[in-house]
Amino acid sequence: MTPLETLQQYIDRAERIVFFGGAGVSTESGVPDFRSVDGLYHQKWDYPPETILSHTFFVGQTGEFYRFYKEKMLCLDVRPNAAHKKLARLEAAGKLSAVITQNIDGLHQAAGSKNVLELHGSVHRNYCRRCRKAFDAQYMKNAIDIPLCDACGSVIKPDVVLYEESLNGDTIEAAVAALQRADLLIIGGTSLAVYPAAGLIRYYRGGPIVLLNRDETPYDYRADLCIREPIGQVLEQVEVR
């Protein structure tokens, strides 16, 4: 049996699939990742990306933060790829119960997924730090220099989890509950190196574990199936039935 046939068999038998995904899910849509050879960690900036994308840097050097953020994080012209679309179809068919994502691009929702648990927030939600007025991503993109609230003039902050910040407790609780109920866990496009997000996988107690990632991960030894092909290419071949 080929790896794809095995994956299809797992999906056919499952009733409560949970997909746990990372940057590799969106790179096929043109969203840059962080750790690949041409990712953000390998590009030249005055500061390392992990420094720029920290709470301390946001507060202390807001202008420089937004220069990086608007150029590298606000990818508003990208579209869902085959992976996003197939996961949405699996959910619509009643096979997939949740998408747990480390991505902040909103592409799962754009593809039609409903139950998306965004561990690191979303670029599409932004709030004034003083009056909490909400703004969309396009407002942030169009802002000259630092995005300011049009109601009170204060700085707007993206609803994304920066370094030094905690994950949202309600999102974590929902992710744990979904993993505990799942009977198939598909992990895709993630190095499983970012904690605490990657640590959530330990709550899964169901059936098979499938890993769809181009590189090895610390969790490979636990997986029942590892496929090293591009995730969109793999999921595109899966039949929903």
Image (cartoon, grey):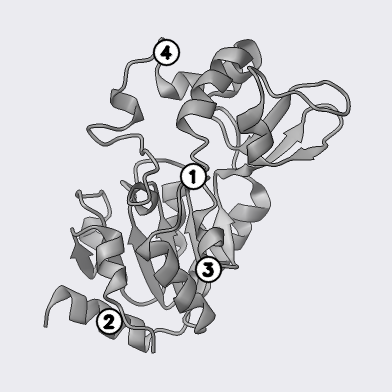
Read off the residue under disc 4: 47
Residue 66 occupies which quadrant of the picture? top right
Among numbered discs 4 and 3, the one appearing first in the sequence = 4
Read off the residue under disc 1: 77
Does residue 206 appear in the picture of this structure? yes
The answer to whether the residue labelled 3 contacts the one labelled 2, judged by CB atoms less than 8 Å apart, is no
Among numbered discs 3 and 2, the one appearing first in the sequence = 2
> What's under tag 4, amino acid-wise?
Tyr
> What's under tag 2, amino acid-wise?
Gln
The alpha-carbon separation of the residues under discs 4 and 2 comes to 44 Å
* Secondary structure found at label 1: loop
Classify mark 4: residues with Cα within 10 Å, few (<14), some (14-19) or many (20+).
few
The disc label shown at residue 8, or none: 2
Does residue 182 appear in the picture of this structure? no
Instruction: Tell me the quadrant of the picture where the N terminus can be found.
Output: bottom left
* Secondary structure found at label 3: strand
The alpha-carbon separation of the residues under discs 3 and 1 comes to 25 Å
Left-right relation of 16 to 23: right
Residue 116 in the image: state x and y as whole percent: 56, 61
For the residue pair 237 and 225, the one nearer the viewer reads as 237
Q: Above or below — where is 107 with respect to 4?
A: above
Residue 85 in the image: state x and y as whole percent: 43, 68
> What's under tag 1, amino acid-wise?
Asp
Instruction: Tell me the quadrant of the picture where the C terminus can be found.
Output: bottom left
Read off the residue under disc 3: 98
* Secondary structure found at label 4: loop
The alpha-carbon separation of the residues under discs 1 and 2 comes to 32 Å
> What's under tag 3, amino acid-wise?
Ala
Among numbered discs 1 and 4, the one appearing first in the sequence = 4
